[in-house]
């Protein structure tokens, strides 16, 4: 018995990713996490908006205009992702002396910049010359790609640092800050692994026939889909972790309910005591 499944793997992964992002946004807003992590919330919303525009605008706009929109959104998302890392670092290392914080940040940034500089080939100055609108888009796409790589390396470094020493500050295990950092580093490792694998394939595999070329493209698509699966798993991880409260914390409505119950209990005790005093005063007056 054969089932006719009309959807492709790309469509299924897109749907699951977009749905998970919407659920995560609901959790961030409904559980009052947005106030603590505004940049993280903004990055999820911007990524969801980017996915939506890919479907709504594809085939409805000229190719150059569509490419400009996509590259602009990608560049904006790359900048926001860097802001997310700064936000997580500030949340994780509250109380650290400013000079130590700055030195640590510069160390991580320097290491990441060195990795990006030696990662993959760099285009020549002629290729980066801005002499036409198409060349400008090519330059913006290149900047976005390098910023993505920089933020991915920083995410791995920051996640490892928080896991190792975060419990000494305010990013211990089961804290939302560490859980977000673990998710960011997992996504970054998967993305870097895909980039490294694709570069190895491009250097070692030289297709001679059309069949070989299609085989290489299919392999690249599988790597991209695997990266998307990892991102969906991380989204589910964030949904579960951010829905739950951190250890030692309680929701305002729970605290309010406990306060009301305590106040009612105290009021009842006061009323009982007042009744006993009234009864004693009546006995004294009768005597």
Image (cartoon, rainbow, N blue to C red):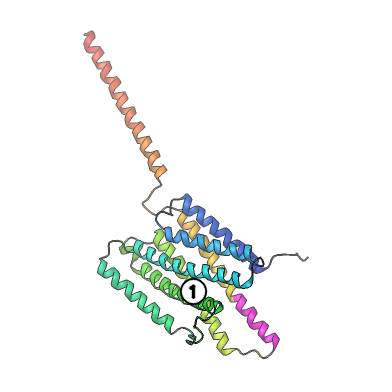
Local packing at callout 1 (Cα closer than 10 Å; few below 14, some 14-19, many 20+) is: many
Q: Kindly indicate the quadrant of the structure image that contains residue 227.
A: bottom right
Q: Is residue 211 magenta?
A: yes
**Residue 46 image offset from top left, x and y in percent:** 51, 62
From the viewer's perspective, is 24 left or right of 206? left
User: Residue 192, position in %: x, y?
Assistant: 49, 76
Q: Residue furthest right?
A: 1
Magenta residues, dominant SS class: helix
Viewer can see residue 171: no
Would you identify the image quadrant in which residue 97 lies? bottom left
Residue 140 in sight here: yes
Count of labels shown?
A: 1
The one of 121 and 198 positioned closer to us in this rendering: 121
Q: For the N terminus, which image quadrant? A: bottom right
Q: Quadrant of the C terminus?
A: top left
210 vs 5, nearest the viewer: 210
In the image, what residue occupies the spot 29% across and 73% down? Answer: 103
Q: Is residue 125 magenta?
A: no
Provide the secondary structure element on which disc 1 rests.
Answer: helix
The residue lying at 33 percent from left, 76 percent from top is: 107
Q: Position of residue 280 (x, y in %)?
A: 25, 16
User: Which portion, as a residue range, is magenta?
Assistant: 209-222
Image height check: is 241 above or below 214? above
Q: Residue furthest top?
A: 286
Residue highlighted by disc 1 = 144
Residue at figure coordinates x 65%, y 79% from the top left: 218
Vertical placement of 204 versus 73: above or below?
A: below
Residue at the (54%, 81%) spot, across then down: 197
Along the line of sight, which residue is nearer the eye, 269 or 44? 44
Q: Where in the figure is residue 28, as x and y percent of width and height?
A: 47, 54
Farthest residue in the front direction? 131
């Amino acid at each position: 018995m054969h089932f006719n499944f009309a959807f492709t793997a790309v469509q299924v992964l897109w749907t699951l990713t977009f749905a998970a992002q919407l659920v995560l946004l609901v959790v961030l807003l409904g559980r009052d996490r947005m106030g603590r992590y505004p940049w993280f919330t903004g990055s999820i919303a911007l990524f969801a908006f980017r996915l939506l525009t890919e479907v709504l605008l594809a085939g409805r706009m000229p190719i150059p205009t569509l490419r400009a929109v996509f590259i602009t959104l990608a560049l904006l998302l790359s900048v926001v992702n860097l802001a997310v890392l700064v936000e997580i670092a500030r949340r994780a290392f509250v109380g650290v002396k400013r000079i130590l914080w700055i030195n640590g940040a510069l160390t991580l940034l320097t290491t990441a910049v060195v990795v990006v500089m030696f990662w993959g080939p760099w285009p020549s100055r002629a290729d980066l010359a801005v002499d036409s609108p198409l060349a400008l888009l090519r330059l913006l796409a290149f900047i976005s790609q390098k910023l993505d790589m920089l933020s991915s390396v920083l995410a791995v470094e920051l996640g490892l640092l928080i896991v190792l020493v975060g419990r000494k500050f305010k990013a211990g295990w089961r804290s939302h800050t560490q859980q977000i950092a673990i998710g960011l580093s997992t996504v970054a490792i998967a993305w870097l692994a895909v980039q490294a694998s694709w570069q190895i394939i491009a250097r070692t595999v030289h297709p001679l026939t059309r069949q070989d070329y299609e085989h290489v493209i299919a392999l690249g698509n599988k790597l991209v889909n695997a990266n998307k699966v990892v991102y969906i798993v991380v989204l589910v991880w964030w949904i579960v972790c951010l829905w739950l409260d951190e250890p030692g914390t309680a929701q305002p409505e729970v605290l309010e309910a406990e306060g009301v119950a305590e106040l009612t209990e105290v009021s009842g005790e006061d009323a009982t005591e007042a009744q006993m005093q009234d009864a004693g005063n009546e006995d004294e007056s009768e005597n």
